[in-house]
Amino acid sequence: MSVVLSTAALGEEGSDPAAASLRLSGFGSVGLSHVEAPAGWGYRREMTQGGSDARWRADIDSRLGAQVNYSAGHHVELVAQAIAKKRGRYAGDLDALEWAYVAYRPDADWTLRAGRVNLDAFLMADYRNVGYGFTAARPPIELYGMLPTTLDGADAARSWLQGDTQWRAKLMLGSAHIGAPQLTVPGRVRHVVGGMLSREESGLLVRASAARTRIDFDLGAAQPALDALAQLRALPLPAVAEQARALGERLGSTGFWATFLELGLRHELADWQWSAEFVRISAAPMIKLSSAYATIGRRVGDWTPYAGYGRTRDAMPALAVPSWQAALAPVLGLPAAGQAQALATAVAANVNSSRQQQSGWSLGARWDFHPQAALKLQWDRVHVEAAGSGLWTGADGRPAHANVATAVVDFIF
């Protein structure tokens, strides 16, 4: 379902289209979820969101957004969108500003934007926070949980018709914030260079995107452990030195390059609608993620029952805890060897708990009880594999199952 926000234009109908105009619109979600998960585990919709191990949660999907569009004639438009929602402890005041850009349209085919724009690298990029715009209670977290929403930079898009087929191409440049599972500060992707191509005909949208970016993390919280591992690497013990190097790379790499690839499909035919998307992120030595989902629904009157499945896998292997006690005792002494062994155990546990090895089924129904509002009821069955709980907060890396029951009302105005 495509999203079209209702707008209220401040002006008279039939006025000069070249004259300045102001449009206001908004959207929101009011949700309540019941989470059954291991003690201490915090469910979250996205990695930039703070988690909580409370069973009853109203902050997972609830949000309120407002958008202002100011058109300065035929060619120039200013757009700002702000969203109030639960964010991580490190979030700044400006993070609430989702969009803030100037758009220039030299003709009907081209659009140039600069500022804070939506990161148009995945299927739901335009309406990820607008619950009314999609069928399910939330975007599949196995794929969308770790993707940024905004791009600070610029993009250029061109649209054209070829018979009955609508084509669209876009080039993107800039930077973005990302969540970090084992750190208390966000990461940042810099020097983003990406492109997108889409084709739409007879209700079928096919799109693909690719990007290359540099990933930077603030390693302040991990620096003491990294310094200790660096000292162990300097010891004349090749096996210990190599294991310490591997632990250090996985714990706190920064300034490395990543490749992002995406393929998405969405089809609306009569009362049936389905979508599927695949994303691959190659960012060694931190992650090599492959994530995918598929959803299908059928509209019956005002109701749309639906089902979905999502899955994410990290090809970077889980870290085994090295056995350093015996090798280090003759060199460092028993107390220091014990401390080094405790460090290795803690680092391996930290890295493994940040890996993402998760799948989940969703069943639900959407009721469009008003032209601008919908009620959704959804049940999720989540399976987390060993060393794969990176989408949760407070998780300990053990395998687990979770159930999430959600009721949410989405609206636009």
Image: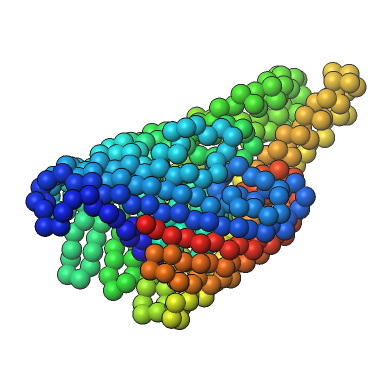
Q: Position of residue 148 (x, y in %)?
A: 46, 44
User: Which residue is most to the right?
Assistant: 334
User: What's the coloring here?
Assistant: rainbow
Above or below: residue 321 compared with residue 340? below
Note whether residue 109 is visible: yes
Q: Position of residue 176 (x, y in %)?
A: 43, 37
Q: Position of residue 4 (x, y in %)?
A: 33, 60
Note whether residue 281 is visible: no
Above or below: residue 9 compared with residue 227? below
Residue nearest the observer in this picture, 304 or 46: 304
> Residue 37's image quarter?
bottom right
Above or below: residue 243 compared with residue 337? below
Could you tell me which quadrant the C terminus lies in? bottom left
75 relative to 95 in the view: left or right: left
270 relative to 21 in the view: left or right: right
Q: Position of residue 112 (x, y in %)?
A: 22, 43
At x 43% / y 60%, what residue is drawn? 411
Residue nearest the observer in this picture, 336 or 158: 158
